[in-house]
Amino acid sequence: MDLTYSAADEAFRAEARAWLREHVPERPPPSLETAEGFAAHRAWEAELSAARWSVVDWPARYGGRDASLVRWLLFEEEYYAAGAPGRVGQNGVSLLAPTLFAHGTEEQRARVLPPMGTGEVVWAQAWSEPEAGSDLAALRSKAVRVSGGWLLSGQKTWSSRAAFADRAFGLFRCDPDAERPHLGLVYVMFGLRAPGVTVRPIARLDGRPAFAELFLDEVFVPDDDVIGEPGEGWRIAMAATGNERGLMLRSPGRFLASAGRLHRLWRARGEPESARARVADALIGARAYQLFACAAVSRLADGGSIGPESSLNKVFWSEYDIALHETALDLLGAEGEAADTEWAERYVFALAGPLYAGTNEIQRDIIAERLLGLPKGRRG
Amino acid sequence: MRFLFDAEQRAFIGSLDKMLTTADTPAVVRAWSRGEHAAGRALWSRLADAGVWALAVPESRGGLGPRPVELAVAFVELGRHAVPGPLVETVTAAVLLAGLPETGPAGRLVPALQAGEALATVAWDAPYALDGDVAGVRLALTGEGLFLSPGHGPVRRSLDPARRLTSLAPGGRLLASGPPPARALLHARLCTAAQALGVGEALLAQAVGHVRRRTQFGVPVGSFQAVKHRLADARIGLEFARPLVFGAALTLDPADVAAAKVAAGEAAYATARAALQAHGAIGYTAECDLSLWLTKARALLGAWGDPDTCRTEVLRGAGLR
């Protein structure tokens, strides 16, 4: 067991820190859930990408640095410690890119990944439907075979970033007669401005259009934009949600930085006794999450994989994030009500954590059934 | 960075687990609680043979240590099997005594502890010393220094019947003056955290076993979501305490050790509550072996740094960065 980093890894960290110190904007850009903020965040991605810091763990030929997961952890620590902006391309980078690496063709990777890495093309997700939330396999939107591709029709919802994004990826039913609902799905990529697509932004709690409904009416998708074999969509998508819940969606660096900010806020407010235990718990939780990730990265480096353990991670970070921001708002007292503090938007964002990427109820079922070995209940 | 056990550590875990599984520890614990120490002392010797006590003694004094990671590994197993006795105290005494000149009493006491011939207890900022009636080495830390206590008071019952609380007689030989070395308290706290983690893992395993077997309304009670989710939460708490315990063993940073103590102590206690609820009334009986772990989870929460004390240490550490 060893928690020290090699000299080469420390040099990588130092290089990232030096670049970020030079380039992170002094004033944070406007909220990325606004048109103006979205554009500013996209420009920031271009700046990161020009110095090859936007997707460090990708191969160099797609714009990355071939960085190991250890270096990715170090980069993320430096990124959030520097107070750098949120990542507008995260849906694509954390979900679609791993899917392309595992199941895409070389032609797809060469075409899709570079503009994703620069922020030129921002991706939204198209999973949930009005009648398919936690029970995602009940989805009804269909893909009908035509010459050279597929026609997509139906309705998707809760599509994060879709109000301003360029393209989307998701699952559609290509074989309505398949034996089980999980079979007969196809994984496709499509343009949000393609003929037949209507995007209706949805205002989240604070009124900002953080997600959208998508209406699709015979939207043509060429065969080149299908990932893997039609009928294999569920298996392909689930491999990536394991990744999403596992490591990449919320890096430890993010929570280490948040816990540090909370600790400084507590001290600036005169170290009130009422929040003392909760501030300590934020520091403890960030350290636990960091070390948990170190263990996961070590397992992966040893040839292991992240399976249902990722559900532990997802419940932990999503509930941790809310508790941390609630503590911050409590420390702010009456000012905590104001929507224009640096804490307020992060609080609203954190509230969604237990709902998306598989609700925490679904995650607890997975933990109980697959990790503890308890019998399946009425669900499934 | 490689935050995983190596093959030797995995083998050590496996051999301890196997030895303790065959030792019928519930019977040993029940005898110990009645003040019958023979079986416990025999187990103590076998732990010495496995090298557990030597891990706290530096190589320069004939031991295998200092090996805090292996100590943490061992204490998870000791907790998992509810091994009774002044386990943490014996390690703490070994660390304290190994820092003293060999020409004094430490020269004879350290080898006795390492060989499992003597058990030790330590009174340090607590109203009691654990198992002072069976410990051959009784250390008392006061404002003046470290004393070898000449005797002990009557046994006071603990919420955990296997923990026999005693006062130590004042006076005795002064072994060292001034404050004790910080590493002694860090070892005590780390080992308690690891022991609590093992206690929590044993409680969860027993709760899972019970709800798989027990049926009501014609189905296993473990198929009900209310039961599943409470046990899932217990698993989450333990899984995130575990890296803190081994991270603290690697750094021996006071804030890391304190964080591990808070997380492991509270996760084990939350698991105890979940396990009791999952068992229903049978879990509330002294007859059910679950009680041996249930009561220990509560006792360890306050031992060697209660959560509030440890949270203060975490905040102090963060203030230094």
Image (cartoon, grey):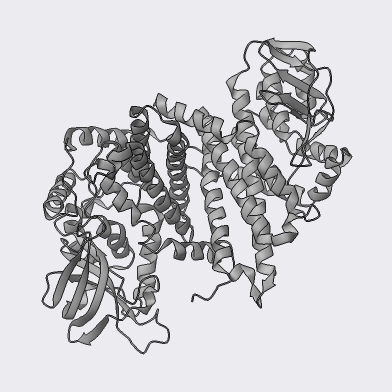
**Left or right of A254 in this view: B296:** right
Residue B238 % position (x, y): 56, 49
Residue A253 % position (x, y): 35, 42
Look at the image and tell me whether residue B182 can be seen.
Answer: yes
Total number of numbered labels? 0
Please identify the quarter of the rendering in which residue A121 is found.
Answer: bottom left
**Left or right of A43 in this view: A294:** right
Look at the image and tell me whether residue A80 can be seen.
Answer: no
Between A111 and A270, the one nearer to me in the picture: A270
**Residue at left offset 69%, top offset 63%:** B210
Residue A270 % position (x, y): 37, 27
**Left or right of A141 in this view: A190:** left
Residue A269 % position (x, y): 34, 29
**Residue at left offset 28%, top offset 60%:** A97
User: Which residue, as the protein is rendered here, is positioned at the far front?
Assistant: A334
**Left or right of B76 in this view: A71:** left
Between B38 and A61, the one nearer to me in the picture: B38
User: Which residue, as the protein is rendered here, is positioned at the far bottom?
Assistant: A177
Between B57 and A266, the one nearer to me in the picture: A266
